[in-house]
Image (cartoon, rainbow, N blue to C red):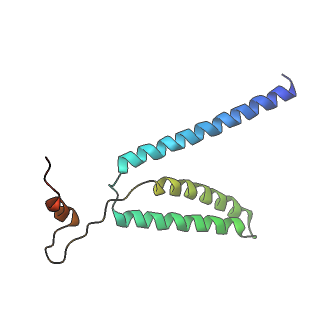
Amino acid sequence: MSEGKRHDSTFLVLILGLVGFLFGFGFLINRLGRLFDRRIPRRLYRIVEISLIGAITLGIAGMFQPWVLWGFRWGFLLLFYATLAYIVWSHLVPEPMQFESPETGKTVEQIESRMAPPEA
């Protein structure tokens, strides 16, 4: 096999692998979104979101510190995986907020359902 053909096939495998990864990642986001749609408590959602942002910040700090090589290596891995996790997490929708009327103690959904016009 000539050198030029080997480079062409390597490039093709690389492109197909990247496209496969992107489609697989999109499929994962879609499935998790359908599975957890509006089922994640808001408080848990916010805690995980802040934790992922903190992990991204630590990863950046690890990559920019100039003292030890292992800090760069672990910082890169932390940044990479925290970013992927944040992308997935940001596509999930937490449960809706429940607002209660101070006078009646009923939720907004209960009040709106009583105010809806009758169906014909």
Against 7, residue 102 (above or below) is below
The answer to whether 99 appears left or right of 113 in the picture is right
- Residue name at image x 86 percent, y 24 percent: 2
Give the quadrant of the N terminus: top right
> Horizontal and vertical percent for residue 117?
15, 56
The answer to whether 60 appears left or right of 1 in the picture is left
Against 35, residue 3 (above or below) is above
> Horizontal and vertical percent for residue 118?
13, 53
The answer to whether 52 appears left or right of 109 in the picture is right
**Residue at the far top in the pictured view:** 1
- Residue name at image x 17 percent, y 58 percent: 116
Toward the viewer: 44 or 120?
A: 120
- Residue name at image x 64 percent, y 36 percent: 17
- Residue 61 is drawn in which quadrant? bottom right
Count of numbered labels shown in the rendering: 0
- Residue name at image x 16 percent, y 69 percent: 106
**Residue at the far bottom in the pictured view:** 103
The answer to whether 25 appears left or right of 59 in the picture is left
**Residue at the far right in the pictured view:** 3
> Horizontal and vertical percent for residue 42?
35, 64
Toward the viewer: 94 or 54?
A: 94
**Residue at the far front in the pictured view:** 120
Toward the viewer: 83 or 92?
A: 92
> Horizontal and vertical percent for residue 63?
69, 64
Against 60, residue 119 (above or below) is above
- Residue 80 is drawn in which quadrant? bottom right
